[in-house]
Amino acid sequence: MRRATVAALYRYPVKSMLGEPLEAVEISDRGLSGDRRFALLDAETGKVASAKNPRLWRELLRCAATLTEAGPPRITGPDGTEVPTAAALSALVGREVTLTDVPPPAGTLDRSRPEQVLAAGLETAVEADTVQFGSASPPGTFFDFAPVHVITTSTLRRIGELGPRGTAEAERYRPNLVIDTDEADGFVEHTWTGRDLHITDGPILRVIASTPRCAIPTLAHGDLPRDPDALRVLAHHHRVPALPGRAPEPCAGVYAQVVRGGWVREGDVIRL
């Protein structure tokens, strides 16, 4: 890898809703400022709403959330109109939900088995694993695993080359940082586990695991249509153990923890 730079930055104010593109943001041990600050709780089950269970929650990926200076985020629905209350949000997703910034004790979510979703479709009830989120994150956060998710332009380019459309959108994989790896080829970030990413003279991120992909990349994201090949390509061409001792899974991108905080900006240089 001859040169690497920060190509794009995203945060996701409400878990499983569309992200906000940023030009600069501060990073701490709790990830990007404002990232996954809020989530929806399902009143019936007490679990955190996640589009990892697409049969119930895929509509969240057609909603956008923007942080405000104080109070709850501004949420807009698929048609661009504001969703001002929990009741309106419940009507939109078809289940009673509440918006919270406090994770429930021992919080969990349901992760539908992604290849069963591919085979059976979005409306079919498939097997799901109950996952306790945030095991590599500070307490009181809504991250699935670790506080920062990174993907490279070489991985996105390779997914596109292997798929029928010839392209792959970063938004489907919900990264915090998209790293431009110049002319590097293939799934390059999967060689970074255990190494530190130094961002200019600021933050240091430690890569701790590859990112196993759920059904989320296949779903409609805002104006992006459904694309089963966003997962199918990985299932056929890039199965690796996300962590030592785990069975190989379709992976794209890596999880990272924050060794040293600071500001990160588009164009910042990355060195390993």
Image (cartoon, rainbow, N blue to C red):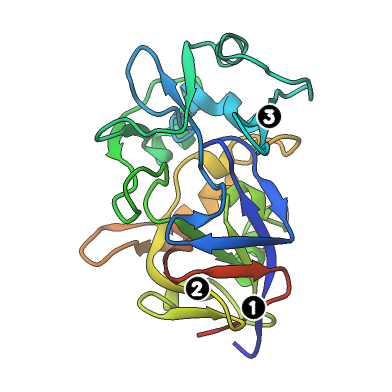
10 Å crowding of disc 2: few (<14), some (14-19), many (20+)? many
Give whichever of 16, 237 is nearer the camera: 16
10 Å crowding of disc 3: few (<14), some (14-19), many (20+)? some
Give whichever of 67, 269 is nearer the camera: 67
Report the side of 214 relative to 13 (left or right). left
Residue 196 occupies quadrant = bottom left
Which dot marks residue 108? none
- Does the image show residue 142? yes
Residue drawn at point x = 54 percent, y = 62 percent: 27
Residue drawn at point x = 40 percent, y = 44 percent: 141
- 110 over 253 or under it: above or below: above
Residue 102 occupies quadrant = top left
Which dot marks residue 189? 2
Which dot marks residue 74? 3
* Mark toward the viewer: 1 or 3: 3
Sequence order check, earlier mark of 2 and 3: 3
Mark 1 → mark 3, Cα distance in angstroms = 34 Å
* Mark toward the viewer: 2 or 3: 3
10 Å crowding of disc 1: few (<14), some (14-19), many (20+)? many
Q: Tag 1, which secondary structure? A: loop
What is the residue that sits farthest to the bottom in this orientation? 2
What residue did someone put label 1 on? 181
Three-letter amino acid code of the residue under disc 1: Thr
Give whichever of 250, 209 is nearer the camera: 209
Label pair 1/2, CB-CB below 8 angstroms: yes
Q: Picture coordinates of residue 191 (x, y %)?
A: 43, 78
Three-letter amino acid code of the residue under disc 2: Glu
Mark 1 → mark 2, Cα distance in angstroms = 9 Å
Q: Picture coordinates of residue 93 (x, y %)?
A: 56, 16
Q: Tag 3, which secondary structure? A: strand
Q: Picture coordinates of residue 49 (x, y %)?
A: 44, 27
Three-letter amino acid code of the residue under disc 3: Arg
